[in-house]
Amino acid sequence: MSLRPLLLGHRGARAIKTVPENTIPSFDLALTHGCDGFEFDVRLTADGQAIVCHDPEVRGIEVARAKAQQLAGMPTLEEVLIRYQESAFLNIEIKVAKLEKIVPKLLRDHPPRSHLFCRKCYALCICRA
């Protein structure tokens, strides 16, 4: 049996500057380039949507005060879970505390068939689907 390291793309294929990080095309590219999965960040919009986003502000819009429709083009956590639940190791970084109830519910509704790693600044949770 040969062991190899787990290869994860940081925010997808972040090094490829022609593809925006934390997007479906970036996640697809990371997998195409041979990664086992990817790390991505999740924030909460004012209308309660868990969206994939690293920074608290995007295009001059504060994510926590915006409605999801104002952040068009940014995938939701649910979209990512559905699309990659069978094909990728998901490393989810939870950026805000209010996601503590939303993320577990979405994971129950769309359980990854591969491995999953969730983390936040003050708590660590390792789950195996």
Image: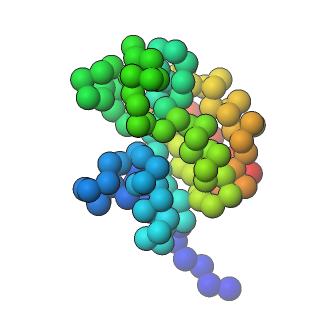
Is residue 44 visible to us here? Answer: yes
Residue at image coords 61%, 37%: 78
31, 41: nearer the viewer: 31
Q: Position of residue 53 (x, y in %)?
A: 41, 35
In the figure, residue 113 lies in which quadrant?
Answer: bottom right
Please say if 98 is above or below 125: above
The answer to whether 48 appears left or right of 62 in the picture is: right
The answer to whether 107 appears left or right of 73 in the picture is: right
Please say if 2 is above or below 86: below
The answer to whether 61 appears left or right of 88 in the picture is: left
Residue at image coords 32%, 54%: 19
Which of the colour schemes (rainbow, by chain, secondary structure, one colour) is used?
rainbow
Q: Position of residue 15 (x, y in %)?
A: 29, 59
Please say if 104 is above or below 66: below
Please say if 101 is above or below 74: above
Residue at image coords 59%, 57%: 89
Residue at image coords 65%, 23%: 101
Q: Position of residue 17 (x, y in %)?
A: 25, 56
Q: Position of residue 50 (x, y in %)?
A: 53, 29
99, 83: nearer the viewer: 83
Is residue 8 visible to us here? Answer: no
* Quadrant into which the N terminus falls: bottom right
